Amino acid sequence: MSEQMEDKEMEKSRKYVKIGGFIVVVVLLCLIALAFGSCGQSKTEMQAQIDSLKLENDQLRLAGEYEQLNTEFQQYENQAQYLQNDSLLDKYTEAKNKVEKLLVELKTQKITNAKRINELKGEIATLKKLMRHYVEIIDSLSKENAGLRAENAEIKERNQQLTSTVNDYSQKNEQLNQRMQLAEKLNLSGLTLTALNKKGKPEKKLEKAKQLQINFTIPQNNSTPVGEKTFYVRIVSPEGNVLGGGKTFAFEGGKVEYSEKKSIEYDQQEAHLTVYHNISTALTKGNYIVEVFVDNYRLASKTFALTK
């Protein structure tokens, strides 16, 4: 940024040197005329005119320098945000406003004494130093911010990769948990439904049946944790009623009616279970559905025809 400022300063200076050069030529011509007494004026008048032209030339040159400095301040206006220190930002703003004020003075008022010109020269030298100081800070902070942006982009990319890896592991863990849950689930085989008479013998005639007997087998499963298991049996009549209904168990966040339940101490070995349901109302001929539930999932559902 400093090199760009120097190039612009040289280009701006050339413009005002050309204008100042014209005034210098005029001054030189008058000096020559004074030396040969051909200007038609007294030496005092001629000297005053020369001094006035010098002041105008100095004022014009200074106006050019202040204009250039003001342009540079404006150029860095949008980057003043990098001056995060409030005190430093206040000084920057103060210097910028001072340049604008002095530029107005140089363009609108005629300066008639060399003392004020010298004061303005000192002011512009000081302001140029300040400008170079601010530019160095802005350059440094701009580079620092660019580095932080690059670092943040790299961190963001790493976070995205990490998130992707975590999601991948989460998905794999979920799949593994599902496989483990499936492996831990009990199986059921040999589900039967038999009507029994008052002597506990199989009964073909429904009107004489006093009990319904449900038999099933739980095969060996070394993946299932040992412990108490409660099996819930639902017997649904052809009319869609749950025999012995009114009792419920928790299932998939809700409540489900059941006919009978049986609890055992499961030890991962094969188990043969028999569940009895006492008939309290006359049974009708048709298809009966028997369902068995355990550990919040349905082990089996099977339809049996009782037609005699």
Image: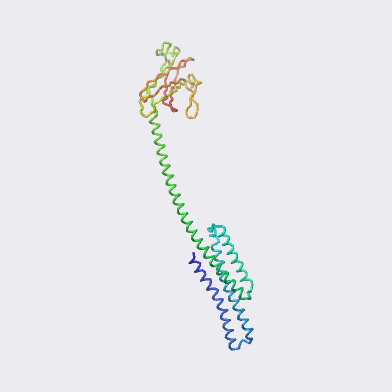
The residue located at (48%, 60%) in the rendering is 140
Quarter of the image where one finds residue 223: top left
Furthest-top residue in view? 199
Q: In which quadrant is the C terminus drawn?
A: top left
The image shows residue 32 at horizontal and vertical percentages of: 57, 86
Residue 265 in view here: yes
How many marks the image carries: the answer is: 0
Q: Report whether 92 appears left or right of 251.
A: right
The image shows residue 183 at horizontal and vertical percentages of: 38, 31
Residue 69 in the image: above or below residue 248: below
Residue 306 in view here: no
The residue located at (61%, 83%) in the rendering is 47
Q: Report whether 158 appears left or right of 84.
A: left
The image shows residue 214 at horizontal and vertical percentages of: 41, 19
Q: Report whether 188 appears left or right of 108.
A: left
- Frontmost residue, 273 versus 90: 90
**Which colour assignment does the render follow?**
rainbow
The image shows residue 17 at horizontal and vertical percentages of: 54, 75
- Frontmost residue, 152 versus 275: 152
